[in-house]
Image (tube, rainbow, N blue to C red):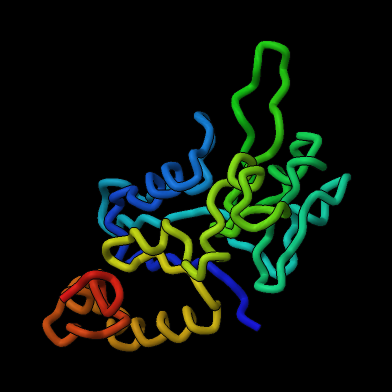
Amino acid sequence: MARMKFLCDAERCIECNACVTACKNEHEVPWGINRRRLVTLNDGKPGERSISMACMHCNDPPCAAVCPVDCFLQTADGVVLHSKDLCIGCGYCFYACPFGAPQFPRTTDFGSRGKMDKCTFCAGGPEADNSVEEYQKYGSNRLAEGKLPLCAEMCSTRALMGGDGAVLADIYQERSLRRGYGSGAPGWSTAYGRNDRGSPFAPGGPGTGGA
């Protein structure tokens, strides 16, 4: 059984924010919530790196461990979802998550934060697949349509990948071997080199619209 995971290659991320925009547009995420965000380290300095962050769909999710109403569930593919019908907006999951994935709408005049919202790996929620109720609460269910998360599919440099964790690990291992270590180069010669044409490990590879 596949275990769905995200992997972001900081050597390839160009900080374009396409993944962030794609997520908000696909799921009509409410104002004030970002299911995915871009984090940049050493901004403007040598060694600057950016990484796209969202729910990492942990094997043993800490958010589920602290939830007092057990609103979290994990699918057979390892995707961590939650039920907005059960959520009470206590915020425990926000503090437990090391990635800051659970988000809440902005506080109202009366202090209410509403139901928690998080990345669903484009797998919808506990409602019936691709139903109106599912879309209104959780957004699109691309996995039910046989598609991968849109944020990963929209990444122009293939820095952000989503899919079976074992396959992603093999791809990243191959990239690391070809890129080398300690050269000081960020890997763009590998990403855009002529020898990479037709390779699934390269930006614009088969199925991505590349040559």
Q: Residue at x 31, y 82 (%)?
A: 200
Residue 165 horizontal/vertical position (percent): 55, 77
Rendered location of residue 63, percent (x, y): 74, 52
User: In this picture, is 20 found above or below 6?
Assistant: above
In terms of image quadrants, where is residue 59? bottom right
Residue 39: tell me if it is visible. no
Judge by depth and name the residue closer to the eye, 95 or 27: 27
Picture residue at 21% right of the left edge, 85% below the top: 198
Q: Is residue 145 at all visible to an observer of this figure?
A: yes
Number of labels in the image equals 0
Q: Residue furthest left?
A: 194
User: As drawn, which residue projects farthest toward the top?
Assistant: 109
Residue 172 on image: x %, y %? 41, 80
Q: Position of residue 155 (x, y in %)?
A: 33, 60
10 lies left or right of 165: left
* 172 or 87, nearer to the observer: 87
Judging depth in this view, the residue of 16 and 138 nearest the camera is 138
